[in-house]
Amino acid sequence: MITVTRINHSETRHEVTIRDHALTVDMAPSEGGADDGPDPHDLYDSALGACKALTILWYAQRNAIPVQDIEIAVARDSSQERRGIYRLTATVAVSGPLSSEQREALLAVAAKCPVHKLMTGVTTEIATVWAD
């Protein structure tokens, strides 16, 4: 389970707890926050980048592809979000002595990472309820 708890009653910061991990989230100053951590959109976008990076690594390790460094840069265009269009561009950089065929295979597997599939291929149903 993931919990989100307000840190200080007079501020916008919250602590997100995931298993034994904790991070601070906040809103941008333009939204009334202090920018003491990423905002929810940042977390959503970073989930995509993290999933692509880990999927590339997983695939490379299982297929003896000599990947060294992996970097995924995720750029957001939310200018049409209120119209139902939220655009993310994931730019992949991988180093290592890779053939063009290996590079193409890694890019293809990155496009099939589980979070990418969740964001584009399933209907997510969310229930918001009061705690007991």
Image: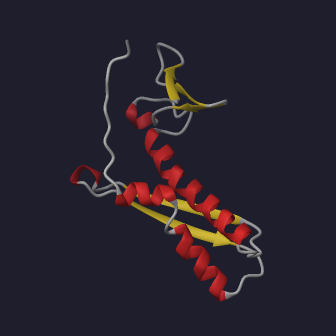
Residue 111, percent from left and from top: 49, 69
Picture residue at 71% right of the left edge, 69% below the top? 62
Residue 101, percent from left and from top: 63, 87
Residue 117, percent from left and from top: 43, 60
Picture residue at 46% right of the left edge, 60% below the top? 116
In this view, the residue in front, 114 or 94, is: 114
Residue 122, by quadrant, is bottom left
* Residue 65 shown left or right of residue 106 in the figure: right
* Residue 28 shown left or right of residue 123 in the figure: right
Picture residue at 64% right of the left edge, 71% below the top? 93
Residue 92, percent from left and from top: 59, 69
Q: Quadrant of the C terminus?
A: top left
In this view, the residue in front, 53 or 34, is: 53
Picture residue at 76% right of the left edge, 75% below the top? 64
* Residue 116 shown left or right of residue 73 in the figure: left
Q: How did the renderer colour the structure? A: secondary structure
In this view, the residue in front, 12 or 54, is: 54
